[in-house]
Amino acid sequence: MSAIAHLKSHYEKLDNFEHIFAITRWDEAACMPAGGAEARGEAHSELAVHIHRLATNPEVKAWLEQASLENVSDKDQAFVREAMRHYEAMVALPESLVSAKTKAGSRCEVAWRSQRKNNDWTGFVKNFKPVVELAREEAQIRAKGRQSPYDAMMALYEPGMTSQQVDSVFNDLKTWLPATIERVLEKQVSQNRSIPPLETTIPVFEQQKLSKALMQLLRFDFTRGRLDVSAHPFCGGVPDDVRLTTRYNENDFIPAMMGVIHETGHARYEQMLPNSLKRFPVGKARSMGIHESQSLFFEMQLARDSQFIPVLYRQVCEKLGCFLPEKYTESHFKQEVQKVERGFIRVDADEVTYPAHVILRYEIEKALINSEIEIEDIPELWDSKMQAYLGLSTKGNFKDGCMQDIHWTDGSFGYFPSYTLGAMYAAQFRAKMSQEFDLSNCIKSGNIELIETWLDRNIWQHGSVFETNDLVLKATGESLNAKFFKAHIEQRYLK
Amino acid sequence: MSAIAHLKSHYEKLDNFEHIFAITRWDEAACMPAGGAEARGEAHSELAVHIHRLATNPEVKAWLEQASLENVSDKDQAFVREAMRHYEAMVALPESLVSAKTKAGSRCEVAWRSQRKNNDWTGFVKNFKPVVELAREEAQIRAKGRQSPYDAMMALYEPGMTSQQVDSVFNDLKTWLPATIERVLEKQVSQNRSIPPLETTIPVFEQQKLSKALMQLLRFDFTRGRLDVSAHPFCGGVPDDVRLTTRYNENDFIPAMMGVIHETGHARYEQMLPNSLKRFPVGKARSMGIHESQSLFFEMQLARDSQFIPVLYRQVCEKLGCFLPEKYTESHFKQEVQKVERGFIRVDADEVTYPAHVILRYEIEKALINSEIEIEDIPELWDSKMQAYLGLSTKGNFKDGCMQDIHWTDGSFGYFPSYTLGAMYAAQFRAKMSQEFDLSNCIKSGNIELIETWLDRNIWQHGSVFETNDLVLKATGESLNAKFFKAHIEQRYLK
């Protein structure tokens, strides 16, 4: 057996355990009763250790070394490159650090749930300190002196991306964003866009019907996936069995509807990963930024587009019509879908203000992991950046400020940039599509076949065969560039 | 570390993987879309191999040998006895046989689904032959020349039980059963019990509400379990997270209602297994017969009791009242719940005719595994026994005859007796309860606390600490005896 063949069979085995883990993690969020948590926690930590041991088996290293000497095809070169990346990310940390990190993260996250509610920053800092210390240790180890600690963490989500590159696009956005937000808000006020609250109650069961109809419209494959409910919506499972979740609010159907469309974008990517490669690292999604570009393409570029809103509105009327007041017109619906507001909370933010939330977090976590600031500096920094980017004060308001996100509580530093990278990729993809086919007509018609073909040909079917920059270059003719996102926002909100 | 301590930590590890497996098996039946089956099948077979290797790790044998020499408490003696039983059952088969058996069983079962529909006995025999050959090989290996091959298979489900003992109670039943069925049917006819079909449609959603209310009444702990839907109802999951399923028929609410009550009996047993032992073999359910005694206690001894029927009827009216015709009285409901009929299908059988179905299968599978008959003999034997026990002909009707059950398709020979052993245990437990407290009043009131306390004290909290016969002896003062079941049937259907 060649080294490549050994590696393939190794990754198939690993994939079997990861499949199991993906399903029980979904179950934990979507099904598990509270009393099952303790036993599940133990079972999960056992499974995580088993997967880590399998992934870092010394034989893997030998196969990888041998494979890199073998004369292999281009496809197999990509296979080896991604296998190596996977192995190195897994083997970098000693088991003791993995375990210490998991424990500190879990303790901090569990306590945070109530500390956040109580605005208890002092209590939070106690549990957060070891999380940050361990993350810094992890980042040092991963950096190997070849890159900054923060870049080493970000590479877990955005392989190949450096903070220098992120700085460059984020700085571009930053100079433009505050004034743009101001202009958008002025325009919305001048158009008298004050939306009266939609006073109606729509049963969850009916909203579910709408969700499924929209997933169907967006060509989600229900023979290989399903939709359920969880407190924090996500897209989990495995490519042949993708598990989407959402949460419903009986007094406002729009967040769940948009959430489902967003997660459907993630799901389409997963369902369309290359069949022959999907069990290997080279066949997985390229990066979290590219993943987010798919969900944001579906949500922002497609669903919130003025030309798609009539399509959406028809579905809403068909499924929920009898719960809506007669005066609920298409223009009313459109105002809600395209509403822009300055707010404290990232997850509630619209696409115009969202980058401000991300850039703020990126700047703070980068400085924190690179040991340029300390935990105690965060609240003041947060407040000053909120003032600068969004004109809001979070002084003393930790729960709607630096304590609002789950990411830091378990040490997932380096993840935030992916959200805004995704938004920028999505805008860039859209711009390219417009040159290649009649995108406008496609959106208007509600038949997304041409969009789907483009995404499949340029993104989905490649998995991780190309490095991110090469993928984007091949798809759009240039590297990531903020101009497309800026143009998109100006076109939608300022024309 | 003592050998016992090593074993405990070993079984905790094993339990973690079995937890994961229990949840993904439930998911496979209750959630998984069809397209996920292939990947799941592979993941499950990988996990099964991993569990088998863990369970048969040579260190386990060494610890077991050492532990049996150590001076251990009574409780730990039971621990070692059950651990040994578990290890020996797992280690008996070579991995090649386990794998051959799984493959042959899976092929036969999948083909059976359509062959049964097509009444295709000849096609079925082709796949069934290797299943029987492998089962005979397995039975020979397990028997080790110390017991009959069939007894060795039955011991997987009924440890400590021999076919001699089963013969003795089943022969007792057999001499009594055909005439009893005849008398019950005559009595029902004389009472003019022809029940007009209930012509109504009750949405699944409403039936679910009734199911959950009944589970609540039977004190199912919803913080440690849930109810879902699957094609074949079962009780799965783990003690702290028990997963029940049922299937609904919009035109007949009674089967799902009774199915849920039955599975709730299984679930209560699982949820109440001894907390400090539940992760070890000694803390698991005692046997399949005892498990079935719990579900049948809830379904037959409690729910179909004339004194409990008013309680049930009130719940039915409260939850489903607006879907029921006005003429649907309590006596109508009672007739449906206590209806006795001769039929072809075991899973649809009432408690009076059920043992006939089981005894027939027991006699055939015992002869088959002990190589006293061949596969080709089954249809004729089946028909002659159906004639003798139930007065029905299955000549040429394989699909409602010897091809109706899933058990044989995957080689689960030795399981059938558990159903009727369970029914007999349940009647015996009931008789003892009646002596110890005012059972009748407890049933009438719908408050099952005293029943629950009795079951917990005598069955649930003991897990597998005692051998089955000792457990029954301690609980009821005598070994398994068919007289209680016979008296129960006569009392309910002939008085």
Image: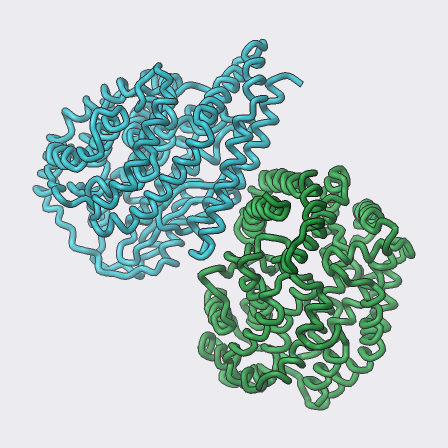
Chain colours: A cyan, B green
Instruction: Give the residue at x 52% y 15%.
Output: A77
Quadrant assignment, res A458? top left
Quadrant assignment, res A440? top left
Instruction: Give the residue at x 40% y 40%.
Output: A103
Say which quadrant the N terminus of chain B sits in.
top right
Count of residue discs: 0
* Residue B307 drawn at (x, y percent): 58, 85
Relative to A95, say whether A324 is above or below.
Answer: below
Tell which of B146 and B412 is nearer to you.
B146
Tell which of B282 and A150 is nearer to you.
B282
- Judged left or right of residue A235, residue B467 is right
Relative to A334, say whether A471 is above or below.
Answer: above
Q: Is residue A76 visible?
A: yes
- Judged left or right of residue A109, residue A360 is left
Say which quadrant the C terminus of chain B sits in.
bottom right
Instruction: Give the residue at x 44% y 36%.
Output: A99
* Residue A263 drawn at (x, y percent): 38, 41
Q: Please, which residue is most extreme toward the front here?
A: B71
* Residue B162 drawn at (x, y percent): 81, 62
Q: Please, which residue is most extreme toward the right here?
A: B372
Tell which of A193 and B429 is nearer to you.
B429
Relative to B156, say whether B65 is above or below.
Answer: above
Q: Is residue B21 visible?
A: no
- Judged left or right of residue B29, residue B488 is right
